[in-house]
């Protein structure tokens, strides 16, 4: 298919930080428009400290430079917990194509081992696994908290756009199944299998993704007409996109758009993705403002944890999970 020049919209979040009603409405209108059309957008003036971003990228480079044995020690029980290391070619985001050319490391909400959520075996509640690297854990957790706060702020604008109270999502995102994922993509070589890319064509599973790519590029977004758009890095900006869970919550008013990563640059690519899924017990049910005459609810209510489980089960082959657990 044709790959066009980039034309993803840019949303300035500065009005959200002024606590003014018209500022919230302005951002809500802009996000609502792009969420209905392409579902991908850049955000600028987001409030996340630049030095923290740089330190987190340094942490990603440091981790992926570790010996494979050290990384593989952090793979146990990945499918149940969605935490730890995923080795190269350990995922198939597009099951019809060869496995993805990437490796990843996931952390989630940081919960102490003695917490009742861990002891009672709550869905997607687990302790994080950490590499033995000085200063690494505090940096990554600080970044997790910063982008999680940004995601909650974006949901206030989203709620306003959808006709709900701005605080509608507050109690559905206070203990989220959020995942911070560090990613490393090697360059695709001439020996790469036919159809194999860095990340196969897929949609994201949660409510919203906040992505920070390096300057290498490689992200491509597919418009509804089938044209692939390049999404290059914009200095000082995150790339955000709507996920499947929020699309379901909005009765398909918002769109979760297919995308992929193709690294043909000849150099290594790194990115940091934050996936904001709701609390496990949050009920994903059609919002009142997203239904009406001629548009009945399209989906039955489901818990956020059951919805995420259904998505993950389709991504990881049983054999892969067994290998990752060794």
Image (cartoon, helix red, strand yellow):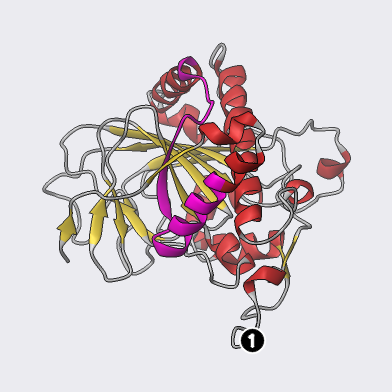
Nearest the eye: 249 or 263: 249
Magenta-drawn stretch contains 99: no
Residue occupying the far top of the picture: 134
| Segment colored magenta | 26-51
Mark 1 lies on residue: 293
* Whether residue 3 is situated above or below residue 212 in the rendered picture: below
Location of the N terminus (image quadrant): bottom left
* Whether residue 216 is situated above or below residue 197 in the rendered picture: above
Q: Residues within 10 Å of mark 1 (few under 14, many from 20)?
A: few
Judge left or right: residue 297 versus residue 188: right
Residue occupying the far front of the picture: 22
SS class, disc 1? loop
Query: Which quadrant of the figure has residue 285?
Result: bottom right
- Confirm whether residue 300 shows in the render: yes
Q: x, y percentage for residue 227?
A: 23, 64
Report the residue at 20% width, 57% height from top.
193
């Amino acid at each position: 298919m044709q790959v066009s020049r980039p034309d993803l919209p840019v949303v300035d979040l500065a009005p959200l930080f002024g606590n003014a009603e018209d500022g919230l409405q302005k951002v809500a209108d802009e996000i609502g428009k792009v969420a209905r059309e392409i579902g991908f957008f850049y955000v600028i003036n987001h409030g996340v400290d630049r030095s923290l971003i740089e330190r987190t990228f340094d942490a990603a480079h440091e981790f992926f430079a570790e010996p494979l044995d050290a990384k593989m020690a952090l793979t146990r029980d990945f499918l149940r917990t969605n935490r730890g290391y995923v080795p190269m070619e350990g995922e198939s985001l597009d099951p019809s194509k060869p496995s993805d050319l990437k490796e990843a490391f996931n952390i989630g909400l940081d919960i102490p081992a003695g917490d009742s959520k861990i002891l009672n075996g709550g869905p997607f509640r687990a302790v994080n696994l950490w590499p033995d690297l000085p200063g690494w854990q505090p940096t990554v957790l600080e970044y997790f908290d910063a982008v999680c706060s940004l995601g909650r702020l974006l949901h206030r604008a989203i709620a306003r756009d959808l006709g709900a109270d701005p605080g509608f999502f507050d109690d559905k995102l206070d203990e989220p199944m959020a995942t911070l994922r560090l990613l490393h993509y090697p360059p695709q070589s001439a020996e790469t299998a036919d159809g194999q890319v860095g990340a196969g064509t897929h949609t994201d599973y949660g409510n919203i993704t906040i992505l920070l790519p390096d300057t290498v590029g490689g992200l491509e977004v597919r418009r509804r007409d089938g044209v692939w758009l390049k999404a290059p890095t914009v200095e000082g900006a995150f790339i955000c996109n709507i996920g499947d869970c929020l699309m379901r919550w909005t009765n398909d008013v918002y769109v979760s758009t297919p995308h992929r990563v193709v690294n043909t640059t000849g150099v290594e690519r790194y990115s940091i993705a934050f996936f904001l899924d709701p609390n496990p017990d949050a009920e994903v049910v059609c919002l009142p403002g997203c239904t009406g005459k001629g548009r009945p609810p399209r989906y039955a209510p489901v818990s956020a944890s059951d919805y995420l489980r259904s998505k993950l089960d389709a991504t990881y082959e049983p054999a892969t999970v067994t290998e990752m657990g060794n």
